[in-house]
Amino acid sequence: MEDTITTEPMVRVTRLKKVYESSGRRVEAIGDVTFSVARGEFACIVGPSGAGKTTLLKCLAGLLQPTSGTVELEGTPVTGPPPGMAVVFQEYGRSLFPWKTVQQNIDLPLRQKGLPRPERERLTAEALTAVGLADVSRAYPWQLSGGMQQRVAIARAVAYEPHVLLMDEPFAAVDAQTRAELEDLVRSLWKTLGITTLFVTHDIDEAVYLGERVLVLSASPTHILEDVPVGLPVDRDQVTTRSTAGFAELRARVHRGIQDAKAGRQSTAQSIVGTAQ
Amino acid sequence: MTAPAYRHAVPEEATTMTTSTTSPARRTAARAGRRVLLALGLPVLLVVLWWIASANSTNYYFPPLSTILDWFRQLWLGNKFGSDVVPSLIRLFAGFAISVVLGVAAGVALGLTDALRRGAEPVLEFVRAIPPTVLVPVIAIFAGIGDSSKILVIVSGCVWPILLNTAEGVRAADEVMVDTCRSFGIRGFARLRHMVLPAAGPQIAAGLRQALSIGLILMVIGEMFAATNGLGFSIVQFQRTFAIPQMWSGIILLGVIGFVLSVVFNLVEKRALGWYQGQRESQKRNG
Ligand SMILES: Nc1ncnc2c1ncn2[C@@H]1O[C@H](COP(=O)(O)OP(=O)(O)OP(=O)(O)O)[C@@H](O)[C@H]1O
Ligand SMILES: [Mg+2]
């Protein structure tokens, strides 16, 4: 990898800081975060609940204005939602339009892009086939199970042909079996399409299983604790990959990182309690 | 039978599929028939009771139903249909249509702009608190007694529930859906058409329903006050000339019109907001 110095990273986050201020309350959600993601990379962002994962993702997506610092997509600063990005939200039930069929849901963003009809139909059909939902294109989202709805959301994002795909805990609300299936789906989509993917989760195993790289976040005010390259083979399998020694080691390493962060937070909390008494 | 590719919106179909041998179409028909019977049962009973109770009535103010219905046929199915019923209905529809356009447009504007809504809210509450009926004589003063005056009366009452409900529905748009639109570049008119308006649809429909019944009332009152034809005008005319059975027949006609409008409204709503019904049912089933 000699050309990493010369090629522009796909996403570059520099000294990002986000403070929520509302009616006198001040929450420093993101302290100071710097990282970049290479073209075609699959990076997982893992952090405890309330770590500011959603906040970070919204800043990346241009949905939230950072307090300071910058986000760049392919060298261009992100000031609003950039056209080359697609987001899969955690709340699939609220992200799909219930008054539109599955097919219409996928079609709408493509129409906004001004694509001609045959092109839209091709992209929609391909995306639905890729997520295994070709036979329910005329159903409404509420007629589908949770896992199927999340598949539709993924299909919508994929059909949009983004350069970067952002996913915010997309499988937090589905059962374990469906979750494993969806993980493999995302992995295989990434392998075949090569979309740069940023996947946010609070599940360490999921992060290690999916990513080529895991960024471990501290509790808020967030900074990056560790940047762990995942050296597992590209072809992964729920049973064999998860039972390898390499997987266990990576998992332990990420775990320790988070535990250390928690311990750090607890010791500061105790010292605060200590001084108050 | 193959397994359904996705969950059915109608759950009983899945449970009865194995035991019942009758075709689904026939069962649907039977169910529809039962619903019609239930819906018509009480009204029919009341009419029969009225008929029997008033059969030999000599009370001047409560003539026998048979007499009233006789007049009903002569008047409203006769030449008064064209001269009075049709003009009334045209006024109602015109007033309602104008209210929908104004109310939805202003409601969307208010719902989307916080500053506008905060500025307009006190004024809206004040205007809404005025019973629309007191405006009838006022409107008659400056708009005369023509059709436009009657339509204006209807609009003055109908527009508020539509406007307020639309504003409320638009304002309550889901945050995730708003973010979804932003990240997929769905903005401007497309956002309005594909997200804002459908999302506010159920609430707008509630406003339209209120507006329709207010509109019917105002149609009658507007015509009672100053008019030369129309249903309200005719009923007052009969009352003043002590044509009691004719007056009753007009009141019955009003009831029938209100009923038909509500049935039509329900049908349209069911078609337009079928997704909402389906979504609610699936949420109920899945907890
Ligand atoms: N709109 C907001 N206004 C004020 N504070 C907020 C807002 N959104 C989030 N926060 C705060 O910022 C911090 C980070 O929130 P965020 O939702 O980004 O965390 P998260 O890592 O996504 O959490 P979870 O795992 O629960 O989804 C939390 O302390 C939260 O209370
Ligand atoms: Mg979150």
Image: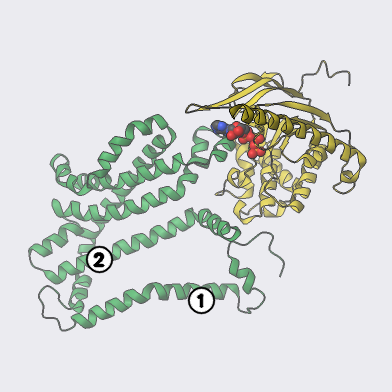
Task: Using the image, name the chain to which the residue with label 2 belongs.
Answer: B
Dot 1 falls on a residue whose secondary structure is helix
Q: Colour of chain B?
A: green
Colour-to-chain, yellow: A
Q: Name the mark on residue B30.
A: 1
Q: Is residue A9 left or right of residue B145?
A: right
Q: Are marks 1 and 2 in contact (CB under 8 Å)?
A: no
Q: Is residue A120 left or right of residue B153?
A: right
x, y percent for residue B173:
49, 41
Quarter of the rendered structure image containing ligand 1 = top right
x, y percent for residue A172:
69, 45
Residue situated in front as seen by the camera: A19 or B60? A19
Dot 2 falls on a residue whose secondary structure is helix
Q: In the displayed structure, would residue A69 be above or below residue B171?
A: above
Please tell me which residue is depicted at 15% across the width and 55% down the height of the picture: B224
Please tell me which residue is depicted at 16% across the width and 62% down the height of the picture: B235
Q: Let me know if residue B230 appears in the view.
A: yes
